[in-house]
Amino acid sequence: MSVLAMRSIRQRPGRFLATLVSAFLGAGIIMTFNSLYDTAGRPGVDPASKEILTTSASVVGGYGTLLVFFAVASTLTVNVRQRAGELELLRCSGATPGQIGRMVVGETVAVALIGAVLAIGPAMLGGQALLDVFKDSGQVARSVDHSFGPVALLSGFDITLVAAAGAALLAVRRATRGRRQRGRARTRLAYGALGVGALSTVSTFAFSATDEALMATPAYGAILLSVGFALLSPRLLKGVLERLPLTGASGWLAVRNLRRRADHLSGILMSLILFTAVSVATLYMQGVESDAMRASGAVRTADAKNLQTLNLTVVGIIVVFVCVMLVNSLYAATTYRGREFGQQRLAGAGPGQVLGTVGTEGLILTAVGLFFGTVAALAGVIPFTIVRTDSVLPHQGLGIWLAVGSTAAAVTIGTSLATARRVLRVPAVEAVGSTA
């Protein structure tokens, strides 16, 4: 099966481009931050600089590992679903589920290995730039030199390859396991995340306003709540669609398509919910903390500066990864609908009506993702604001939320419309005659 996997990559390199991009970015981020471990281990580094470098590498490295897994998993899920006919043909030819799984894992690991190799150069430059940021903010001594050594290389390759292999196995299992069995496990995990997230946010009231760990509890609670909502995204989307009063041909068709494809769109909605919750919660809580520090006249400690840098860096990483995940998933999902678009055009729909339907679908997905992501974020922001400032809502206004929502809408709707416009260039008869 390994020979078949390599031939599949050579015959259809475009299919694996999304996986390559996800692995490249993931390995680059992991190696960039884990190079701080190598830097902290250099002789002559003072204890304060070593602590900040080690903390930054461990926190962001953990987020990076999860993001690599989710990015590759979302891409592979769409890929495997689109290859259902090919995989079924292999099974009819005598291939066992284990052999098919090894083939998909072999393809994914080979592509991830290429992505990790390509990421070495950018990671070295990124590590140096990140160290300069810490130096400019006074968190690390000017005498510390950057080092890109074995920790960065081994962690980048190991984490990327393990995450890619795990994501490939998960995608194959999701495609081959029974829908009822998969749904029960996912529901249990979702309710577990919601329960733990709710307890985490409520426990914020057990802290005082000056505790250093005050922000951690509501932040993790908001993340867990968003994970729970994300896992329940197919049900949430169907529930919203049942109560959505859309009229007109494009609106009616968009709702019908979304109901039929709710399970397939779960990866896109999951990315939107996670992006909204983590970005809104982190940025608002950091804004509340910064305003409280200025109001009290206190001088920022090195730990406070480091926390702010980490928060903004994590949000930046999430923005990049979620944008990549959304673009990859939306591009693959919309390109796969070429036959459907051709049938609509042969039935009398014009290109403008098809684009209107796609745009309405993107708008609905964005609105649902923003709503549940905002609910999860507020569950963490409100307790933190009450404890830190005695106010219920932060005083930063709607600017942060509007920026996050605009980014999500631009990526989701823009990618869908741009891809659909490209697909519509194919003549309708040719699109319908092609294989699904």
Image (cartoon, rainbow, N blue to C red):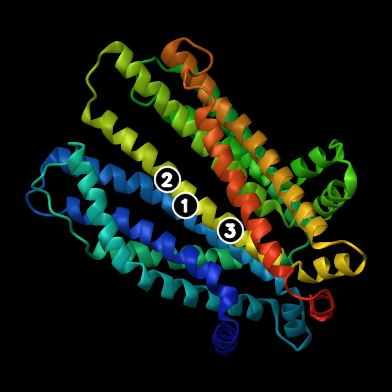
Q: From this view, report whether residue 370 is shown above or below residue 434.
A: above
Mark 3 crowdedness (10 Å alpha carbons): few <14, some 14-19, many ≥20: many
- The residue to which callout 3 is attached is 327
Amino acid type at mark 3: Val
Residue displayed at 42% across by 45% down: 316
Callout 3: helix, strand or loop? Answer: helix
Mark 2 crowdedness (10 Å alpha carbons): few <14, some 14-19, many ≥20: few
- The residue to which callout 2 is attached is 316
Image quarter in which the N terminus is found: bottom right
- The residue to which callout 1 is attached is 320
In three-dimensional space, the C-alpha distance between marks 2 and 3, rounded to whole angstroms, equals: 17 Å
Image quarter in which the C terminus is found: bottom right
Callout 1: helix, strand or loop? Answer: helix
Q: Earlier in the sequence, mark 1 or mark 3?
A: 1
User: Is label 1 in contact with label 2 (beta carbons under 8 Å)?
Assistant: yes
Q: Is residue 173 visible?
A: no
Q: Nearer the viewer, residue 208 or 316?
A: 316
Residue displayed at 79% across by 62% down: 351
Q: From this view, report whether residue 414 is shown above or below residue 79.
A: above
